[in-house]
Amino acid sequence: MLVRKKLIIGTVAIVLLLGSLYVLQRLLMPKYVSGIVEGSLIGEYYKEDRKDFDVVFLGDCEVYENFSPVTLWEKYGITSYIRGSAQQLIWQSYYLLEETLKYEKPKVVVYNVLAMKYNEPQKEEYNRMSLDGMKLSAIKLKSIQASKMAGEHVVDYLAPLLRFHSRWDQLSEDDFTNLFGKEKLFNNGYYMRVDVKPAGKVPRAPRLPDYRFGTNAYSYLDRLTKLCKDNGIELVLVKAPTIYPNWYDEWDTQMEQYAAAHDLTYINFLKHMDDAGIDLQTDTYDAGLHLNVYGAEKLATYFGAFLADTYRLQDHRTDETWSGIWQKKIDFYDRMKQDQLDELAKYGYLKRYKAET
Amino acid sequence: MKKASIGLIALLMLLSGCGNKPTEEGAASPSALSQTEGAATSPAASTPASETPEQASDDGFVFEANGISIPMHAKAAPILDKLGKPQSYFESQACAFPGLNKIYQYSSFDVYAYEKDGVDYIASVILFDDTVTTKEGVTLFNKKSDVIKAYGDKFTNNLNLYVYDQGKSQLRFVIENDQVTSIEYLAKI
């Protein structure tokens, strides 16, 4: 009887302790719900009820700020999701695709190639935005292993409490109101901005010591290519039409050669801006680094025609289930657009994103 | 059971006192030569809070243009005032990071500034033609031997990149076929 009582007390104590640690970790982790919201991108994917998308985008801000999935749906009936994150490195893209394949098998994967210029991990803060939102799995472990900075350990990412325990004095209202769940912030992984800041003259591109992409970056591109081929997925390499940081001709040539050697399509949208109707006087919110919603809609319209024709993607707009799902997405998209326009009219900038300049 | 509880309590105590974020002090900020997304050209995000950028600028490399000294990590405003109106100006917000990186283009060089606590500091200077020289007399299109004569042989080398460290700054030369093709002053994190 005494042993049983001790066992119960011990079990309750452990459950309480583990529960406290869990709540503490949730409280102390950055929430990414205002200002720097990009840290919420990766985690939002899991909330999708239906994940059998036609097209999945992978890459850095050049995907999640430049293509509008809602436009792909509205114009072509293409279902798509952007699994992008800030400065997503190619090994992170690769492992995200591995993980995505646990949920779905898209017909087309679109990978933006800007991150090929990085051959090794760059910055913990960016790593966090790609890794912390991933669900715990062996794939996440592999991505952490490939991404951790010198001096970091896998456990730092597996148990974020270890890393963020000292955040207690920086806690804000956001940390408490978003303790067990966050509001939806993105449109199928697309980060919307309605503001406009015309592009001017971009800085001169300095000469580089070496224009060749690194062997590590290439090895993950090889793995991405193989993973797609093994799963019958069409891989499309793209370079988004943003003018800074500079995309060197030498880099472009390497991607052209890679695509040709591996029977892939590579589209450098910088060469198709006129065809897409993109005008960087009106279609960018930060002087040419990223497109705003008007540019993202134009690019999706242009790219969507290619995707629909080339890969014979089915128009799902007559599918009642999909139509119902996407109508809710369109409503959310339109509301967000209107909210941002209202905020812009009221403050002259997007207060939510602390976009005052 | 008791042991497990003690272990978990010990873990909790450990968590409350350990593991500050590893700093990147001592590493060079990513070069403007690599033109990484916004924040990467800015040491601001990683500069230790206790150390002001001005303090860090004292003993590093200094570029001089028309008699105007441009030390790394120095406050940008007085220097930019002296340099006069640039030919063009570009600013970029880092992806997912606060603060702006600002680039001022003059005829022969570009000045990069980073923002910290609302103040701009010099992050980098890149030379674009041979009408400007380093303080020690090296210009674009000089030979590798000219660089070594001016700065010695204590450099680190990776492919075509030759890097000299001094204080909180670096001087970086790209040398191709025995010819200097790029010169960059860089503020170290």
Image (tube, grey):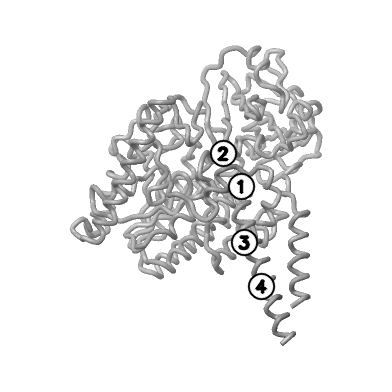
* Gap between marks 4 and 3 measured at Cα: 15 Å
Looking at the picture, tell me which residue is in the foreground, A277 or B66.
A277
Residue that carries the numbered disc 1 in the rendered image:
A125
Residue that carries the numbered disc 3 in the rendered image:
A22
Tag 4 secondary structure: helix
Chain of the residue that carries numbered disc 3 in the rendered image: A
Q: Nearer the viewer, mark 4 or mark 1?
A: 4
Residue pictured at 56% horizontal, 16% vertical = B86
Looking at the picture, tell me which residue is in the foreground, A277 or B93.
B93
- The amino acid at mark 2 is Phe
Name which of mark 1 and mark 3 comes first in the sequence. 3
Chain of the residue that carries numbered disc 4 in the rendered image: A
Callout 1 touching callout 3 (CB < 8 Å)? no
Say left or right for B39 vs B13.
Answer: left
Residue pictured at 56% horizontal, 69% vertical = A138
Tag 2 secondary structure: loop
